Image: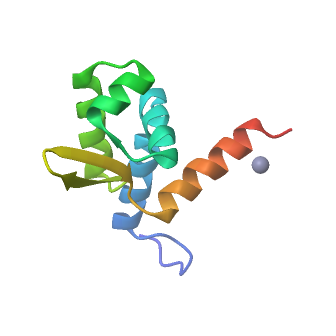
Amino acid sequence: MSTSYYDLDQETLFIVSQSFKALSDPTRIRILHLLANKECSVGEIVEQLELGQSTVSHQLRFLKNLRLVKSRRAGTTIYYSPQDEHVLEILEKTIEHATHD
Ligand SMILES: [Zn+2]
């Protein structure tokens, strides 16, 4: 057991590693990147990214469980967007880091 003030507790470590795991899949990155720019329904994601409906539904559930994506109902349609500013920042910073010189 670590007693360092600077060490992370078990629960935080678990959630952080799960979050990175969620972001380690190319399809999930594409979905999040799309949602970062525009709130979308499942159908819109399917159309924009040319993915299967069940793939999109499955990945959205995964992202929602890890609090990376949130949803809002408008009539019979459910719209998805990134959970909060932090998710947007993580995505944006990682893309920047991956593409700069
Ligand atoms: Zn960098």
Question: Farthest residue in the left direction?
Answer: 76
Q: Quadrant of residue 61?
A: top left
Task: Please say if 51 is above or below 3.
Answer: above
Question: What colouring style does the render use?
Answer: rainbow
Question: Farthest residue in the bottom direction?
Answer: 5
The location of residue 91, given as percent across then percent down, is 56, 48
Residue 73 horizontal side relative to residue 10, left or right: left
Q: Residue at x 51, y 63 (%)?
A: 86
Relative depth, front residue between 98 and 9:
98
Task: Please say if 99 is above or below 75.
Answer: above
The location of residue 7, given as percent across then percent down, is 52, 71
Q: How many marks?
A: 0
Relative depth, front residue between 57 and 90:
57
The location of residue 29, given as percent across then percent down, is 48, 36
Q: Residue at x 86, y 38 (%)?
A: 101
Q: Residue at x 40, y 47 (%)?
A: 39
Question: Farthest residue in the right direction?
Answer: 101
Q: Quadrant of the N terminus?
A: bottom left
Residue 76 horizontal side relative to residue 94, left or right: left
The location of residue 62, given as percent across then percent down, is 28, 41
Residue 86 horizontal side relative to residue 59, left or right: right
